[in-house]
Image (cartoon, rainbow, N blue to C red):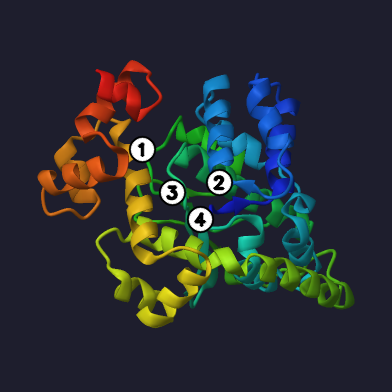
Amino acid sequence: MIPSPTVNLHFSHAILQACERMAVPLSRDVAETVRNQPGRVPLTVQDDLWRGIAAADDDPLLGLRIGAEIQVGHLDSAGLLLMSCETLADALEALLEYFPIISEGSRVERISGTDGAGLRYLPAYDVCREMRVEAVFACMVHLTRWITGTTTSPAWIALAHAPRDDTGRYAELLGCPVRFDAEQYGLFYDRRAIETPLIQANPAMREHLQRVADQALASLSRTSMAAQVRTLVRHHPRWGKERIAELMGVSGRHLNRRLAEEGSSFKLLHDATLHNMAVEQLRGEASLRAIAEALGFADESGFAKAFRRWAGVTPAQFRRRSQSGADSPERARED
């Protein structure tokens, strides 16, 4: 069985609490499903949570408002570790290493420049992607100000989508410049900002929290390889095993061995990821040809054959089922 990426339970609960404070009429079933998770929250459950949030409130910038409600403690040991660092630059480095504690699958990468530093964000989800990415960046802006005790903000935030509402609202809610329709998601701090000391800096506490975070990270190691593969396939659907392995800094043979230890394989992960991406896109307005091209297929016919193998129905049948509100491939076969 392919292990599912997971999200930190405290982080998921923080989203629920933010919805409660903002009187978002979230379905009780959705909320209870999250609350009843025994440990980390599967990404599929997190997807349902965000679907419920989007359906419950029509504010296009609800993600920004929710993100601004997240506190450092909601990020578990990773958040406490960030708070104990000496400077904002140190906190960014810690986030790069310990981000999987907050959310598996999604990744952050370093952005370096002569005038500062920042992070590139690669989300591992497609459901409500724009709203969720905006929540992540609002959270980072809010926490930057909290851990520095100042009004320090990113020099800019880059969003790989168009404005979801009036750009003035973005400026009001984030308090920093936002670039839209960018090539990738990211944020950048100028040199003065990243050198800002943190108000709760504590070297002894940091050393202790680093050990705690290391233990938490180690507990995720058996699934992190599969999660990394999913993320990279999502961003590079045309790439094969060898190129993905090279980007991960391992050989194709080593990647095979690690995935086998997790009860998976590159082909299973590759197919499952493309299937999930196809499902999300088929629920939108893109043509079958455009979807086939985006997923790396040579033509629409190849995509249709692959999708039928994954789902038991053709892409066209799945789209009709989705538009009619049916919930299973079996229903599509009956149509």
Kindly identify the residue that appears in the image at 71 percent across and 21 percent down. Answer: 23
Instruction: Inspect the image, locate mark 3, and give the three-letter code of the amino acid beneath it.
Output: Leu
Q: Is residue 151 visible?
A: no
Instruction: Inspect the image, locate mark 4, and give the three-letter code of the amino acid beneath it.
Output: Trp
Tell me the number on the disc at residue 268: none
**Could you tell me residue 272's position as x and y percent?**
37, 51
Q: Are marks 4 and 1 in contact (CB under 8 Å)?
A: no
Q: Mark 1 or mark 3, which has the lower sequence index?
A: 3
Residue under label 1, please give it. 280
Q: Mark 2 or mark 3, which has the lower sequence index?
A: 2
Q: CA distance from mark 2 to mark 1?
A: 15 Å
Residue under label 2, please give it. 43
Residue 153 sits in quarter: bottom right
Q: CA distance from mark 1 to mark 3?
A: 20 Å
Instruction: Inspect the image, locate mark 2, and give the three-letter code of the amino acid beneath it.
Output: Leu
Residue under label 3, please give it. 159
Kindly identify the residue that appears in the image at 52 percent across and 66 percent down. Answer: 262
Instruction: Give left or right: position of 114 versus 33.
Output: left
Q: Quadrant of the C terminus?
A: top left
**Could you tell me residue 103's position as x and y percent?**
60, 55
**Circle 1 — which element?**
helix
**Could you tell me residue 254's position as x and y percent?**
43, 81
Residue under label 4, please give it. 156
- Assess disc 3: are there few (<14), some (14-19) or many (≥20) residues with their C-alpha within 10 Å of its C-alpha: many
- Assess disc 1: are there few (<14), some (14-19) or many (≥20) residues with their C-alpha within 10 Å of its C-alpha: some
**In this view, the mark in front (2 or 3):** 2
Instruction: Give left or right: position of 79 versus 262.
Output: right
**Could you tell me residue 194's position as x and y percent?**
64, 69
**Circle 4 — which element?**
strand
Q: How many marks?
A: 4
**In this view, the mark in front (2 or 4):** 2
Instruction: Inspect the image, locate mark 1, and give the three-letter code of the amino acid beneath it.
Output: Glu
